[in-house]
Amino acid sequence: MNHLRTLARNSLRRRDFTLRSSSRSFSNLSPESNRSSYGIAFDIDGVILLGSSPVGGSPAALRRLYDDSGALKIPFLFLTNGGGLPESARASEMSHLLGLDVSPLQMIQAHSPFRKLVNRFGNELVVAAGKGEPAVVMSNYGFKNVISMDEYASCFDHIDPLAPYKKWMIGEDGHKEPRSRENVLSQRVHAAFIVSDPVDWSRDIQVLCDILRTGGLPGKEIGPQPHLYFANDDLDYQTPFPTERLGMGAFRIALESIFNRVHDVPLEYTSFGKPNPSVFKNAEDVLKEIASSTNSHSKSGSHHFRTLYMIGDNPKIDIRGARQAGNPWFSILTRTGVFKGKNNHAEFPADLVVDTVEEAVDFILTRESAKQSLLD
């Protein structure tokens, strides 16, 4: 957590490093990238990393997408349902783990769409929950009155009945000085954002039920439900543990089940992340921006791709999403994460099944080279 906190604080010092400035970091793109007819989206957990360790030969595979000078040769990005850190901090983390130069523009996390809600809730009190630095993430998106679940819960005496039995230390928001308790208690919460996987399920479910049942004023009378947003709805995901771990989708199921038992009106919420087709459309737009960023005669996003490759380990999320997005997406399923089957997945079959991401990249480069040879 200290490593995550340091990355997040460093990213805060670079808050002026916007997506526009991120695109300028590709000024050393290889000329070949301007005429690339394809782009690649990589899932992270179970494809590129297991925990914080590279898997499937990922560093060597990704290095093939750069030229000898270190310029990006093939447009690619990371499309993950994970999160908890600002895109700039996560890009720095990936650069360190993989030994490559990863730009924030190449990081599309599950909570990245939250930035589009700043016009609606930018000045309202909102609560951000999850691992890492969720309040820093939201603050970097432009939310001016955001508070972490940790800090918010600490303002209410006895709101978590199990708090005396919890031995871990809860830190404060890393992005600003703690606000006054009285100020928090008097303000109505207008929205709750589940930015990343919650750490303390019992407390977060309890406090969210309090917020959502009372119109955003825990301890008060029943009121209209504030808005609730989940960054993704993944039931499970792969870690270094042999079997999958429960994800944000499992937390959503638990919260919804309990809320609907204690409240007369069913829970209302919005989920983002893969396999939502809008996520893949956004990824295509970002890949076009990456490919077009060095062509001064080309408008950003005007680049045309014949094929976009999605490399993932979860048939229900990665492969299903690419299939629903349709042309020009081509799905590749690896066996290094959630999927471990000998044959293709029965319900959501991929266009190709491989053992590792290294094998997937080799297939893509060989296939695209053969296509180009036919055109030349």
Image: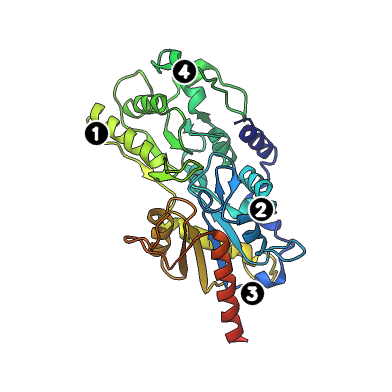
Q: Is residue 171 left or right of residue 186?
A: right
Mark found first going from the N terminus, 3 or 1: 3
Q: What's the residue type where badge 4 is placed?
A: Lys
- Camera-nearest residue between 77 and 272: 77
In the rendered view, would you say 168 is above or below 245?
A: above
Q: Which residue is mark 3?
A: 35
Q: What's the residue type where badge 3 is placed?
A: Arg
Q: Which residue is mark 1?
A: 265
- Which residue does the image show at 42% across and 43% down from the upper left? 243
Mark found first going from the N terminus, 1 or 4: 4
SS for dot 3 = helix
**Residues at marks 3 and 1, CA–CA distance in whole angstroms:** 54 Å
**Residues at marks 3 and 4, CA–CA distance in whole angstroms:** 56 Å
Q: Is residue 241 left or right of residue 258?
A: right
Q: What's the residue type where badge 2 is placed?
A: Val
Q: Is residue 297 left or right of residue 133?
A: right
